[in-house]
Every structure is written in structure tokens, then in C-alpha cells.
Image: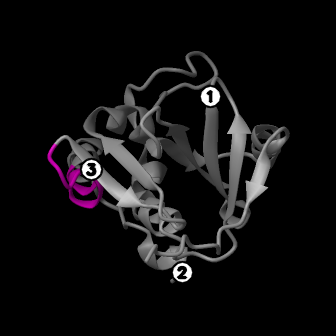
């Protein structure tokens, strides 16, 4: 599968229409249990998605220089790439790196260098992971994210127990 095939065409859609489309896609793709949903990662680990992460992941600042943490504007580029998240996390895309990176906890970071695309997952006390965000980042930023991290193999699947 190629990432380009999964891009959502948003040409001609207003910001209001894009917001509605984005929320509907998020519910459809990730929230299979109402306000919460779960996928299985490439290695068999669960990743949980929560309805309340939509704004953090798919909205951005209209002026990052003045107010970098604002979430007032719909992030068109993030919504266009929303389908990438599931394909990357499930291991359907080649040339993806998976990192365990030290933050406040040990987070998981998926990196597609060719696209400069990252997906952040937070570790859960109960085990598994929780989706945080996904976006395009600069190469320098990505190198900084991974600097003290440990790369893990993407192609290793957990073997089923007998």
C-alpha cells in the first residue's frame, strides 16, 4: 500500500466543511466503541483512540509564530493524511521507523522520513498505547525527537500463543 493512495482530497472544501469531514472520518476510522476506539499495532499491542484527542491532533494555530499552542484552526494537511495513521500503525506501509523515546513517560514515535510524518503514542499504565497526535515535522525536529530514543523493528509481529 502507498501513502499517496490514502490521501484525502480536500480541494474545494470550506474550513467548516473540512472540520465536519475530519470529525466524521476520525469517528469512522478510529472510534469503533463510541467515544473510544482501539486498533492493533504491527506487533500486536493495542492502541486506544479517544474522541477528545481530535482537536489536539487535527487542529493547529492560525499563527504558529505568535501562538504556537493554539488549536483554533482546522489543520487541512493533517486531515488529508488521517488515513495514513491506521495504515502506518498496523504495519501496512514500508520504510517506517518505530522509536521508543524518553518524554515524561516512554512514548512511541512512528516516523516516515520520506514524508517527514510522525505519529505520537503515549504509554498507558494498563499496557499498550494511547494516540496523541500525527503531523508533518521538519527533519531537524524529527532528529531531535529520536536523539535519545531506541529504534525497534517494525517487521516483527508477535507470534500467537498456543
- Mark 2 element type: loop
* Residue that numbered label 1 is attached to: 105
Would residue 149 be found to the left or right of residue 16 on screen? right
Looking at the image, residue 70 lies above or below residue 86 = above
Q: Position of residue 85 (x, y in %)?
A: 46, 59
Which region of the structure is painted magenta? 24-34
Residue at far left of view? 34
Looking at the image, residue 149 lies above or below residue 55 = below
Would residue 110 be found to the left or right of residue 25 on screen? right
Earlier in the chain: of badge 1 and badge 3, it is 3
Would residue 5 be found to the left or right of residue 15 on screen? right
Q: Position of residue 154 (x, y in %)?
A: 65, 68
Frontmost residue, 27 versus 73: 27
Q: Could you tell me how far apart the alpha carbons at marks 1 and 2 are, in whole angstroms?
A: 32 Å
Tell us which disc is closer to us: 1 or 2: 1
* Residue that numbered label 3 is attached to: 37
Q: Residue at x 47, y 35 (%)?
A: 124
Q: Residue at x 29, y 55 (%)?
A: 30
Tell us which disc is closer to us: 2 or 3: 3
Earlier in the chain: of badge 2 and badge 3, it is 2
Q: Which mark is residue 130?
A: none
Q: Could you tell me how far apart the alpha carbons at marks 2 and 3 are, in whole angstroms?
A: 24 Å
- Mark 1 element type: loop
Tell us which disc is closer to us: 1 or 3: 1
Crowding near pointer 3: few (<14 within 10 Å), some, many (20+)? some
Crowding near pointer 2: few (<14 within 10 Å), some, many (20+)? few
Q: Is residue 109 magenta?
A: no
Q: Is residue 29 magenta?
A: yes
Q: Could you tell me how far apart the alpha carbons at marks 1 and 3 are, in whole angstroms?
A: 22 Å
Q: Which mark is residue 2?
A: 2
Amino acid at each position: 500500500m502507498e501513502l499517496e493512495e490514502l490521501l484525502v482530497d480536500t480541494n474545494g472544501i470550506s474550513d467548516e466543511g473540512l472540520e465536519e469531514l475530519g470529525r466524521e472520518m476520525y469517528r469512522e476510522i478510529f472510534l469503533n466503541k463510541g467515544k473510544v476506539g482501539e486498533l492493533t499495532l504491527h506487533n500486536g499491542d493495542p492502541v486506544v483512540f479517544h474522541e477528545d484527542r481530535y482537536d489536539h491532533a487535527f487542529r493547529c494555530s492560525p499563527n504558529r509564530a505568535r501562538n504556537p499552542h493554539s488549536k483554533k484552526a482546522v489543520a487541512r494537511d493533517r486531515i488529508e493524511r488521517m488515513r495514513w495513521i491506521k495504515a502506518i500503525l498496523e504495519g501496512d506501509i514500508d520504510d517506517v521507523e518505530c522509536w521508543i523515546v524518553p518524554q515524561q513517560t516512554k512514548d512511541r514515535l512512528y516516523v516516515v522520513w520520506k514524508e517527514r510524518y510522525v505519529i505520537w503514542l503515549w504509554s498507558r499504565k494498563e499496557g499498550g498505547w494511547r494516540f496523541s497526535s500525527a503531523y508533518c515535522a521538519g527533519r531537524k525536529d524529527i532528529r531531535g525527537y529520536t536523539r535519545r530514543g531506541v529504534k525497534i523493528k517494525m517487521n516483527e509481529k508477535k507470534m500467537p500463543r498456543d
